[in-house]
Image (spheres, rainbow, N blue to C red):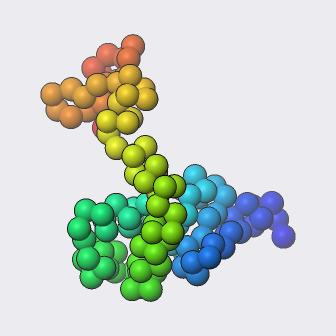
């Protein structure tokens, strides 16, 4: 087995459709065989999307995988809530002492308006 195969070997969780893969999505829990994180599904679920709506947006997922991601969220709520919070624009702006310009672009300190994140 090569070093790359070891690096990419999924680490299983107590939820059969949720794994962690070193080097994929920062090692965060993802739906097996995808790069869709449990955090992504939890965010949609918390925003009021139904399982059916999530499946319409991600037709390659199975209902079991979506339900498993939601179940993982409920079983690991503090961890996923922290990830959701760290992904909010307010957190990013504060972390990097950045601002939003009038067009909604992120301006980092010491950068001119031509050096922005989109």
Residue 115: give x, y in percent of width and height: 35, 24
Residue 27: give x, y in percent of width and height: 61, 56
In this rendering, position of residue 76 left or right of residue 10: left
Vertical comparison of 54 with 28: above or below: below
- Quarter-of-image position of residue 12: bottom right
Q: Which of these two is toward me, 80 or 95?
A: 80
Residue 38: give x, y in percent of width and height: 46, 65
Q: Is residue 118 visible?
A: yes
Query: In this view, which residue lies farthest toward the right?
Result: 1
Q: Please give the name of the residue rendered at 34% of the width and 44% of the height, measured from the top-left corner.
A: 88
Residue 118: give x, y in percent of width and height: 30, 37
Q: Please give the name of the residue rendered at 31% of the width and 68% of the height, measured from the top-left corner.
A: 45
Q: Which of these two is toward me, 39 or 73?
A: 73
In this rendering, position of residue 7 left or right of residue 33: right
Q: Which of these two is toward me, 64 or 57?
A: 64
Vertical comparison of 63 with 98: above or below: below
Q: Please give the name of the residue rendered at 25% of the width and 28% of the height, measured from the top-left corner.
A: 100
Query: In this view, which residue lies farthest toward the left?
Result: 102
Q: Please give the name of the residue rendered at 32% of the width and 39% of the height, measured from the top-left corner.
A: 89
């Amino acid at each position: 087995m090569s070093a790359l195969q070891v690096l990419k070997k999924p680490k299983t969780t107590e939820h059969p459709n949720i794994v962690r893969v070193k080097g994929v999505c920062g090692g965060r829990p993802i739906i097996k065989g995808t790069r869709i994180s449990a955090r992504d599904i939890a965010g949609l679920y918390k925003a009021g999307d139904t399982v059916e709506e999530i499946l319409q947006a991600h037709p390659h997922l199975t209902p079991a995988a979506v339900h498993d991601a939601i179940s993982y969220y409920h079983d690991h709520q503090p961890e996923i809530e922290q990830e959701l919070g760290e992904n909010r624009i307010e957190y990013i702006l504060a972390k990097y002492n950045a601002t939003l310009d009038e067009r909604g672009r992120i301006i980092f300190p010491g950068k001119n308006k031509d050096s922005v994140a989109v």
